Amino acid sequence: MAWQIKYSNHLKERVKTRKLPFGLARDILIFAIERYHDTMTHYLVAIGAGEYEGKTREFAVTYKEDWQRKIVEAITIHPLKQKQRENRIKSGRWLLK
C-alpha cells in the first residue's frame, strides 16, 4: 500500500494566505533535498525549493508520519528565512534525519 498525504487545515490556510501552489507542499514532501527531526516540536521537517514572490526560495514543510496507517500529515509550510535552517541545525533544534 502506498503512503497517503493528508493536509492539515492550518497548512491549507497558509497556502491560501501566502498564495502558494497547493502542490508545493506535496512536491517538497516527496522530493525533499533534506529532512530533519525538530527536537522542540518532535515533528519532521522536509526542505525543498519553490517559487515565492517572484523568486526561488527554500521552504520547510513540517509533517508527521503514521507508519501503521502509512499516512503523512503535512502540518504547515513556510519559506525559510536566510540562515534560519543553519541556525536551527547549529542550535541542535533540527537533527538530520
Image: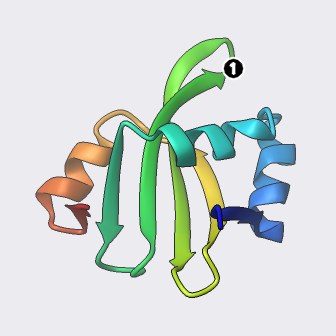
Residue 52 percent location from the top left of the image = 66, 24
In-front residue for pair 25/20? 25
Quarter containing the N terminus: bottom right
> Does 48 appear above or below 13?
above
In-front residue for pair 53/74? 74
Is 33 displayed left or right of 77 in the figure?
Answer: left
Q: Furthest-front residue in view? A: 1
Residue 39 percent location from the top left of the image = 29, 77
Is 60 displayed left or right of 2 in the figure?
Answer: left
Which residue appears at 76% of the width and 63% of the height?
7
Q: Which residue is mark 1?
A: 53
In-front residue for pair 13/73? 73
Which residue appears at 53% of the width and 74% of the height?
64
Colouring rule applied to residues: rainbow
In-front residue for pair 49/26? 26
The image quadrant of residue 20 is top right
Which residue appears at 56% of the width and 87% of the height?
68
